[in-house]
Image (tube, rainbow, N blue to C red):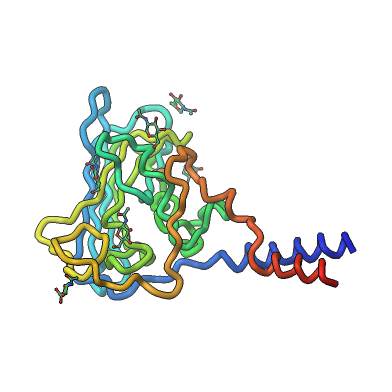
Amino acid sequence: MLVQIVSLLAAASIASAQSSVTPAPAVASNPAGASYVGVLPEKAGSNLRGSISAVSAADGKGVKFSVSFSGLPAEGGPFMYHIHEKPVPANGNCTGTGAHLDPYKRGEVPICDASKPETCQTGDLSGKYGNITAGEWSQEYVDPYSATRADDPAFFGNLSFVVHLSNKTRIGCANFTVGDGYKPAPSSSGAPKPSHNASTPAPTGSAPVPSASSSTPAEFPGAAAKVVAGPAALFALVAALVL
Ligand SMILES: *[C@@H]1O[C@H](CO)[C@@H](O)[C@H](O)[C@H]1NC(C)=O
Ligand SMILES: *[C@@H]1O[C@H](CO)[C@@H](O)[C@H](O)[C@H]1NC(C)=O
Ligand SMILES: *[C@@H]1O[C@H](CO)[C@@H](O)[C@H](O)[C@H]1NC(C)=O
Ligand SMILES: *[C@@H]1O[C@H](CO)[C@@H](O)[C@H](O)[C@H]1NC(C)=O
Ligand SMILES: *[C@@H]1O[C@H](CO)[C@@H](O)[C@H](O)[C@H]1NC(C)=O
Ligand SMILES: *[C@@H]1O[C@H](CO)[C@@H](O)[C@H](O)[C@H]1NC(C)=O
Ligand SMILES: [Cu+2]
């Protein structure tokens, strides 16, 4: 009996953990011309400079990123950079940006396999497109999984990016802000917005639950939460006890 309960629970939680791993969907219909830019602030004692510009891909499918960094330290590379799930606090503390943007709850496992970018955390740009491996670095690519549409779970226009040493130390971070000449549609809720009321309904369906890992400095705080037993396990437990 006990063995049965245990194996039922194990099977149920494995099934539940697997079903929680959703590949990132490609984002279509990003608004034409929607653009967001983040520029690293100059910090005393650091030569690090750089920016990420992001604009809807020409066909609305994904987002074209133009990444440019200079003045990276001589030691501590290769350097990683990611879109993080929260903006930079007003005091510039990069730890306050929380974890990576991860709307489909990849967590740490599996680690980003660049040959299967849909399985990576959406915000893990260097995991998908390569680390910064030189002191001067620029790169352009289209990420199909990022959104400039404010109603998409992969929207990053009100978030931030962070540059890391290979040991994850955060050496720079910047907010994304609305790019020059772009005016977001007034229907977006919660996004960087022109004044409007909040009557827009929340996105439906698989809208992600915001991660509650806010104050954790760890790089992948979502990982530990992955193996939580789901409703199936609870059901199995109840069924086993009743039988
Ligand atoms: C990370 O690496 C840098 C430079 O190599 C070093 O100064 C720093 O102490 C390291 N931090 C951690 C948490 O290991
Ligand atoms: C980043 O954006 C947030 C939200 O708009 C704002 O509160 C914060 O002050 C900004 N951070 C910096 C460093 O400008
Ligand atoms: C930066 O923010 C983190 C949590 O968000 C906090 O633990 C840390 O003390 C802050 N560091 C500074 C220098 O304010
Ligand atoms: C980037 O560097 C990190 C830290 O050294 C490493 O774990 C990761 O595999 C590298 N990623 C790529 C895509 O090379
Ligand atoms: C960013 O905007 C989206 C879409 O409007 C909203 O759901 C989300 O809560 C906002 N995030 C932050 C950190 O303001
Ligand atoms: C919100 O805005 C819409 C259109 O701009 C308007 O029709 C509606 O009355 C407003 N609602 C509130 C509560 O202000
Ligand atoms: Cu990061």
Q: In the figure, is residue 173 to the left or right of 169?
A: left
Please tell me how many numbered marks the rendered image carries.
Answer: 0
Q: Position of residue 117 (x, y in %)?
A: 46, 61
Q: In the figure, is residue 56 to the left or right of 102?
A: left
Q: Nearer the viewer, residue 68 or 239?
A: 239
Q: Quadrant of the N terminus?
A: bottom right
Q: Nearer the viewer, residue 120 or 4?
A: 4
Q: In the figure, is residue 44 to the left or right of 209?
A: left
Q: Quadrant of the C terminus?
A: bottom right
Q: Residue at x 27, y 41 (%)?
A: 69
> Quick one: which residue is furthest to the top in this view?
45
Q: In the figure, is residue 45 to the left or right of 153?
A: left
Q: Position of residue 233 (x, y in %)?
A: 70, 65
As drawn, 76 above or below 67: above
As drawn, 180 above or below 79: below
Q: Position of residue 46 (x, y in %)?
A: 27, 27
Q: Position of residue 232 (x, y in %)?
A: 68, 69
> Quick one: which residue is furthest to the right in this view?
1
> Quick one: which residue is furthest to the front in this view?
242
Q: Residue at x 69, y 62 (%)?
A: 13
- State which image quarter holds ligand 2: top left
Q: Nearer the viewer, residue 71 or 159?
A: 159
Q: Residue at x 60, y 68 (%)?
A: 19
Q: Quadrant of residue 8?
A: bottom right
